[in-house]
Amino acid sequence: MKRLLIFAILFAGASLSLIAQKEETLSGSARVKGGFGGPFFGYSQADGQSGAGGGGGGALILNDIFIGGFGQGESFGQRTVGSRRYTTELGFGGFWIGYTYPSHKVIHLYTSLKIGWGNASLRYNDDDPFDNNDINDGVFVLAPELGAEVNVLHWFRIGLTAGYRLVNGIQTLPGFSEGDFNSPTLGVTLRFGGFGYH
């Protein structure tokens, strides 16, 4: 996930050099307005256990749409399997697309969709770094969100959202079944970059 986050930040930084250029697409001329990178923080649940975490990403801004990548992780409560104690975790990364309108207003609509792949895991609570007793299950995740964004400075914005996370692929994780990681979400997104108005 660290590699994906580094790639997303570098991608966003490189995109700043493309501000105000035109790009031809099948749907017409899409104006590349800028790019951004930054962290986000979230709250959700897994099998009734509350959890929190965060991640980061970056994207190019095309008109009122942004397209990029992200990585994130969340940690939930403790669970006993057999005689061992585990921490429930979810980590994933992938594509990040969103829409803001009218983004030049101080407060405006913010919506995004994260499409990712990763692992739902039970992390064994052991101080021995060579004792790998973790249990992992590969997952596919869709996480739409909707809310409002505030333009704090011309290069800094804060989004507050509510959404829902859909997780598919839980098959072998002890004590969990398909749908246990599905959950309403609350999020805070910080975006730093060039948004095409200055």
Image (cartoon, rainbow, N blue to C red):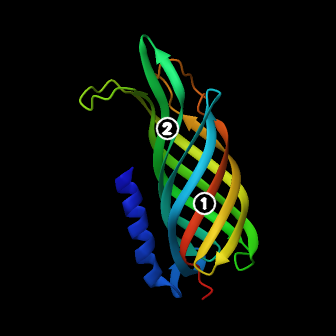
Element at label 1: strand
> Outermost residue toward the top?
82
**157 relative to 168 in the view: left or right:** right
In the image, residue 66 sits, relative to residue 162, either above or below, namely below
The residue positioned farthest toward the left in the image shown = 130
Instruction: Report which residue position mark 2 lands on.
Output: 90
Question: Residue at point 62% right, 81% down?
Answer: 154
Q: Residue at x 51, y 65 (%)?
A: 38
**Residue 132 or 64: which is nearer the viewer?**
132
The answer to whether 85 appears left or right of 189 in the picture is: left
Judging by the rendered image, the residue that carries numbered circle 1 is 189
Q: Which kind of residue does numbered mark 2 sit on?
A: Leu
Q: Most extreme residue toward the front, as rendered?
A: 127
The picture places residue 29, in percent across and down from the top left corner, at 58, 82
Q: Which quadrant of the structure image shows residue 134? A: top left
In primary-sequence order, the first of circles 2 and 1 is 2
- The CA distance from mark 2 to mark 1 is 19 Å
Can you see residue 25? no
Q: Any mark on residue 3, and which?
A: none
Identify whether 30 is placed above or below 66: below
Q: Secondary structure at mark 2?
A: strand
